[in-house]
Structure formats: structure tokens, C-alpha cells
Image (spheres, coloured by chain):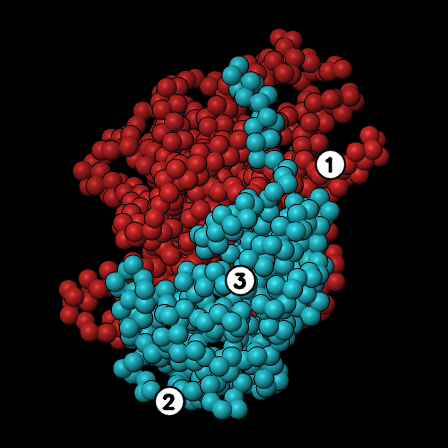
Amino acid sequence: MRLKKLIFFLPLITIFWSNNSFANEVNIYSHRQPFLINPFLEEFTKKTGIKTNVVYSTKGLAQRLKAEGENSPADVILTVDIGRLYIYEDYNLLQPIKSNVLDSNIPMHLKSPENKWFALSKRSRVIVASKTRVEENTIKRIEDLAKPEWKGRICSRPGSHVYNRALMASIIAAHGEEKAEKWAASFVNNLARRPQGNDRAQVKAIFEGQCDIAIINNYYFGKLKYSEDKQQQKWAEAVNLIFPNQEKNDRGAHMNISGGGVAIHSKNKDNAIMLLEFLSEEMSQNLYGKINFEYPVNPSIEPSEELAGWGIPIEDKIPIIKIAELGPLAQKIIDRVGW
Amino acid sequence: MVSNQISLNISDQSSLDVWRYIPVILSVILLCPIIGIIITATGDSDGLWWHLYETVIGKYIINTLLLMCGVSISVLLLGVGTAWLVSRYEFTGRRIFDWLLMLPAACPAYLVAYAYTDFFEYAGPLQNLLRYFFGWQSAQDYWFPEIRSLGGAVFVMSFVLYPYVYVLARTSFLKSPSSYYEVAKLYNKNSFFYVGLPIARPAIIAGLALVCMEVISDFGTVEFFTVETLTLGIFNVWLGMNNLVAASQIALVAFIFIISLLVIELKARSNRKFSDSSQRQTKIERIKLSKLSHLATFFFCSLPVFLGFILPVCLLFSHSLKTNYHQDWAQLLQVVINTITIAGLGTISIIVFSSLTAIIAFYRGNSFINKLSNLASTGYAFPGTMLAIGVLFFAGFVDNFYSIGLNTVIGYSSAGFLSGTILMLVFAYTVRFQAVGYGSLRSGITQIPQNLVDASYIMGKPFNETMRKIVLPLLKTSFIAGGLLAFVDIMKELPMTLILRPFNFETLATYSYQFAHDELIEQASLPALLIILAGLVPVIFMNKFLREIKV
């Protein structure tokens, strides 16, 4: 009856992975993949001696935090995309933080008005266009993509993806709902194929000649350009990167953020703040560029050499929270135009 | 106590039958997360339904139906067809096909979708080869089906999901009494349509139900192929519009839909029962094939193995060679150990839960208990993420209750024992994959001759002894089949593991996903291959076991 013994020991086995938190640790719920945040956390532990524990998931962590209530072991929330941060604030899962370091490192428009969350890096939604089939300087604004001359020449991932939804929100913020929907309808009308695939796939499609123009996040361009895979480097070589809305008096390129905050029932609050501060400081801010081709939020830090090599965009500086607030409306427009 | 030991009327209502409480209690526990989703769905959805009705819901429903029909038809052809061939015919490689045909079950559908997109799309090696061979210049010169489409999703899902039908149908074909086949032969009737199919029907439907639930709850594949199904809609509404209420409502609609299908099928077969009263253990004589049909059989069995296993594995392997990502092998080993441990624990839990509900409900329960146990095995029909939220809801409730209770009783407060532990993860797997164990056992039970059980009662043997000596041994193959599918399912399970796991706990699926999510198929491939490799272990074990008991 070995089975019986095994069943008897089951509860003991589960204790190995129990929920207990210890003094010099910080527990992180992360929407960022381990392989992207581990380099930061290793440096953090090296510097402070604080051990880090991570749960990574793309979705559902806000619900987990909410369900756990006061018992939750989580201290820090790390996310990508402003929409997710906003949900945490909306559910009242974050606490306001007083930190001079964060206040001086992070500009006003990139944090919550109540100091509940802070942007830690920026990424830009950019246009890529075929080097051979699209003449330079013919596309200057995101609005240009609705022009009839591009009919059947644009590729896109589905509109309901967070990055496109945020972009849509930025267009609503700039032009209002009605005009934004008009733009979206014309844009969809210009698509060469049903929205599909991810950002890399759009660049690949341009390389293959299926379409001439696409919208991607700037860091994918970097990842392709410096890929281990020679083939992927060729995809990047086939396109020009265009930062939209750069002309004088224009609003600048749409930016999204990755960011973080401290959980409302955090048991290691000091450690949690220390981690956020660490992520806003020079070494981490440089790491964001080095590891993932993202822009620093700290104004005193220059973007990495590779990033600067493609030009530094003028940024759309609307308070980032607007993008989150307009998200649901953006999704409705996306549903209506069938992007 | 158990007063009706001798009574043949098992559903005797008069006595106080303690056994009956077991399936009821277990079912209620399993249903708690679903109740969590129902509670979430009762909130205010801010009039979102009107928007959905006007814009997308029709598209979602049509796509879901098409996907389900397409996959159902092809898994029936593949699963039942191959199961029939390997159990009734003798041909070259039959003994190997026997277990090779199960292997695609270990391939996570969304990773196969990634690999196949690379392979079949315009720039992929296949079309390149075709262009080179026929001298075509561009996409306008020829027609090739688009892989990122509804058809592509049907294709990918069919070839990794048919093993559910195959495993259960094959178990049933092998166990069907040979006397039936002899009678069919005597009357010159087609033994497949007149014997095999009707007898295996509960098993086939159980397998098909699993496939349908898997299809309706799939997110990874449909997202990658942009097939706008209800599940994709659930996520657009939840994450895009920050409206969990409306999202749970869509999930419930999908859930009710699939449950209705199951109820219709159950009704349709409720008055058909097949069991051999003699239960002679005669070995099935496998039929020898002519040359041409030999070849056709071989080809038909190779096709799903090739497309569902060999090709994806080769593609993943070639991707995994392309990366020089610094792999921490010690860490990877830990991940493998985690995966196998958690899948093992989950499988044990599923077997305990499903056997206690399925067997006791069947032999001791009334119609209410049976319905309740059936209902408790429908967690599979929810998208994993939604079900995870239900589990969180339940675990949070239990933990709060526990810590408040503890505080009032002994004045000491402690965090809960469920949230964020392995225990919660195992519970979540049980809720989600109960259907796998339960379906397998339920279809096995229908093949046990009632007179054997009755005979045991007549001889004065109590219920527990009858179960132990008669029913459990006869269900061995069903246990193994259900356990195998559950094990493989847990190993590749992604959304629930992501959300519910403890700190610093990686399984192969989550480890692979962090790369796949960033579109890094090269780095994602190695852990994906390891999932498939680890999936071989239970398959080989099952095969060995089945040989030993000589079915």
C-alpha cells in the first residue's frame, strides 16, 4: 500500500511551497517575464541583500491580489502597459508611496496623481515601412495611415491587443471619439490582410512583400535587428523606422509604459519601496535599454546607444493615465470597425 | 448503517446511506469555483451587452461553432478511425502505432500553432520549396491555404486533440466482448457500425466532450490565429474594457451551451446499455489485411502521428538549435522536477475525486447525485483563466474564513493555508481536469456487467468489498487511460498555473511561455520539447501496463 503512504505525505509536500514570507524578502507579482526582470532583481539582491520572490503571469494577478485580501503576501506589482496598472488602482490594490527618490526620478505625467503607481520604462508605438516600396517622408503622422493611397498596403496585429488599444486611446485623446472612429475605419479599410500575428510577424510580412507598412513597438525593431537569427536581422533591414507625429506643433509619438506600485497589504513595505526606487535609478534605467530596447523614464538618463541610433522621438506627453481611462472606449471603437 | 447489502435495488431511498454523501460533498467542493464565476457574473455589466450584440457577439458565436464542428468531425474521423484499426486489425507496426497515436496529446496546441505558422506560411520552408520547385514568383501565382485562419485552427487543434477520442475509444473497443463481434459475423453485419460504434459510444462521446470543452476554452491558439471565438471575446471584454462581469457572463453562456449539448447526448443514449453477461475473456482475433488495405491502414495511422507529433517535434527541435540563449541547466532540471511532481500530485487528486464521485454515484446514487457529479466535472468548459479566477475567489473566501476563525478561537491570526500554495494549484487542476478522469471512468463503468455486481451483493458482500473486488479491477484500464490524459493535460496546462502558482515556481509550460509570449519561439522550444518528452513517460507506462494485463 505504497499509495496510501504517498497520500499521507501529500500535505507535507505542499508545505515546501507554502505562502510564508520572511523578513528580508520582497514578493513580486509581475506581468513582465522572468527572463526580462531577473537581471534587475539579481542586481537588486546584490546591492541590498534582499531576496526577491516572483510570480509571473500576463493576466489575472489583479484578481489574485483582490481575492487574497489582507492575507496577500504580495509587496510589489510590476506591469507592462498602463491599462493594467490602472486596473490595480481602480480595484484599490495599491497604496500611496512617499519617496523623494521616486519623486525626483519620475516625471509627473508618468505616475499616478496619488503616487500609487510609477512608470519605470517607456516604449514607443512606431510605424515601419518598406525601404524599397515606400518612399521616405511620405508617412509622417499616424493619421496618414488612413489615407486612401495606402489601401491594401498595411499590416496589423488585431486591434484588441493592448498596444493597439492604447494607440487607439491616444488618437481618441487627440481628436475625440468621432474623428478617431473615422480614422480607425479608414485604417482598417487599408489593411492588406485580416489583422493577425504579433509585432514581429508584421515586419516579416513587409520583408516578404505581403504589405508595405505596419505599426509595431519600437523594441521589437531592436530585437529583430540584434537577433541571434540572421533571418530576423534581414526583416529589420527591410524596413525604415518612422516615429510618427514629430513635426513642430504635432503631439509626438504615442508612448506606453511599464511600471510598478506597492500592494495595499504589503508586509514588507520598506523593501518594496526600495525596489521601486532601485528600478528608477541609473543602473536599472540603463538596463531597460540594454535588455529590452526600452526608453528610460528618468530624465537624467540618456537612452542606450542602440536606441539613440534610430533617433530619439518627441513624445506625446499627455498624462499617461488618460490612455488607461480611454481604453474601454477604444476597445468599443475597435469592435465597431472590426480591427 | 448500510442495511441494503443484500438488496439488489441499489437506488433504495429508504436507508440512510453514508456512501451517498461522498460524491455529494466532493461535487460541491469542485463546483465552488464555478459558483465563484456565477457570483462574479451577477454584477452589473454596464450595458455592455448591447454593444457586444451590435458589434461582435454574432461573429464570436459563429466562429466558435464552426471551430467546434470542424474539430469534432476531424477528431472523430482520426480518433475513432485509428482506434478501430489498431484494435481490430493486424498490420505492420500496429503495436507501435498503438502508443504512437497517443503522443500528440503531449503537444501544447498553441506551441504547435507557432511552429506550424512558421512552417506553412508564405515565407515558410514548405511554400519556399513549392515556389522553387514550380518556379512560382509570388503569392499571386498559386493558391495556398492561409494557416492563420479558422481552417488553420481546426487543423492544428484536430491533430493534437484527437488522442482524447483515440485513447477512450480504443480502451472501449478492446474491452468489448468478442461474442458480439462473432454474432455480427454470423449475421453478416458490419461489425464497426453494428457492434463497435454502439458499444464504444459512451467512450467516444466522453472523448469528444473533452475535445469540445478544450476547443471552447482554448485561448492560446485562437489568439495566435486571430480566430474570434467566444473565449477571445471574453478576454477582450475583461482586459480591454475592464469588465470582468460581462466577461464572466460570456463564459457562462458558452458553458451553458456546452452543457446543453452534453445533456442532449446523455438523454439520447439513456436507454441503451451494453454489457456482456458472460464476459468471457476471449482474446479478440485481429483481422489480417490485404496488401492494398494494409498500405491504406498504415498511411491512415501514420498521418496523425506525423502531423500531430513528428513534424511539430522536428520543427521545435530545429528552432531550439537556433538559439544561443544561455540555458541554466540546473534551473531547467528543477523546472522538470516541478512539472512532473505537480502533474503527479494533480493526477492522484483527480483519480481520487473522479473515482469517488463516478463510481459511488453510479452504484449508490439517485438521479440527483448523478446529475450533480456530472455537473461537477464540467470545469473543463471554462477558459482556464476564468476558472482560475473562480478558484481564487473560493480560496480567498476559505482563507479569510480560516484566519478570522483562528483569530476568534485562539486569538492568533495567520494567513490562510490555501492561497498561493501547491495545494491550491492541485485543487485547481482537479476542478479543471476532473472531466478527464470522470469521463474515462464513467464510460468504463457502463461496460461492467451489472450481473457481476449483483452476484456479489447476493453473496452478501458489502458495497465496499464489491467495489474493491469486482468494479475497481474491471476499471483498471479506464483508470490508466484517464490518469494518462490527466497527467499530460496538467503538464501542458498554462493559464491556471500562471495565475495560481506559488512564488518562484515554474513548470515547463510557464517557463516556455515567458519566451513564447515575447515571440521568441527559439527559446520557447526547448522547454516545450521537454513537455512532450515528459509526456512520453506515462504513455510508455500505460502501454507496458496494458500489455501486462493482456487486453
The chain carrying label 3 is A
Q: Which residue is mark 1?
A: B414
Say what amino acid the circle numbered 3 marks.
Glu
The chain carrying label 2 is A
Q: Secondary structure at mark 3?
A: loop
Q: Secondary structure at mark 2?
A: loop
To the question of a shared chain for discs 3 and 2, the answer is: yes
* Label of residue A281 in the image: 3
Q: Which residue is mark 2?
A: A138
**Image vertical order of residue A94 relative to residue B461, above or below:** below
Q: Are marks 1 and 2 in contact (CB under 8 Å)?
A: no
Say what amino acid the circle numbered 1 marks.
Ser
Mark in the foreground, 3 or 2: 3
- The residue drawn where x is 36% and y is 40% is B329
Residue A329 in picture, x, y percent from top left: 63, 74
Q: Are marks 1 and 3 in contact (CB under 8 Å)?
A: no
Say what amino acid the circle numbered 2 marks.
Thr
Mark in the foreground, 1 or 2: 1
Please indicate whether residue A37 sits to the left or right of residue B379 in the image: left
